[in-house]
Image (cartoon, rainbow, N blue to C red):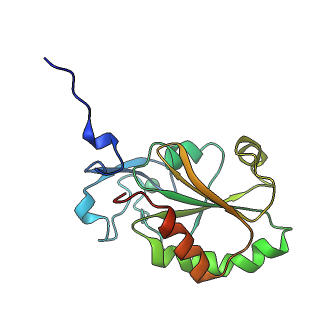
Amino acid sequence: MLPTADLRDTPMNPPDPLQLACPRCNALNRVPAARVAERPVCGRCRSLLFPGEPFALSTAAFDAHAQRSDLPLLVDFWAPWCGPCRAMAPAYAQAAALLEPRVRLAKVDTEAEPALGARFVIRSIPTLALFLHGRELARQAGAMPLQGIVEWARRQLPPSA
Ligand code: ZN
């Protein structure tokens, strides 16, 4: 047999069904690409896989969402003591409704999860970073308004991921 490349591994051809980690229990679910907009729920805990708002991400759960899930993951690195972070939080929450189901939105509290801030060398907060299959596609430091968040995220997306 001749060697072949698996087209499902390229961003131009996202896998179908998509593998998606549950925002609540982190179980990996398989969802047909045609059904992502139909409010799919987790097979284990019945939570929405697209909750319509950013979900908190722990160090332990990070790779399930940023590496093993098949949709881009936008992460807001923030901390409770950070004024600009708190100021941006409502806009970031609204951005989830606009960007799902093409992107999922998470938040990493760098005070509660210092290992993640160190791993990605987050120098200032808030910092937004976009991940897909374990790769960081882009990052942007500084608070942004709703439209800025949405437009920046859309500019960073692979062509059809
Ligand atoms: Zn679940």
- Residue 13 relative to residue 106: left or right: left
Q: Quadrant of the C terminus?
A: bottom left
1 vs 161: above or below: above
Hey, which quadrant is residue 59 in on the image? top right
Residue drawn at (77%, 43%), measured in percent from left and top?
Answer: 118
- Can the viewer see residue 61 in this picture? no
Hey, which quadrant is residue 81 in on the image? bottom right
Residue drawn at (29%, 71%), measured in percent from left and top?
Answer: 38
Residue 97: percent from left, percent from top: 48, 78
Residue 7: percent from left, percent from top: 26, 40
Residue drawn at (55%, 42%), measured in percent from left and top?
Answer: 63
- Residue 36 relative to residue 51: left or right: left
The quadrant of the picture showing ligand 1 is bottom left
All told, the count of numbered labels is 0
Residue 85: percent from left, percent from top: 76, 71
Viewer-side residue, 50 vs 141: 141
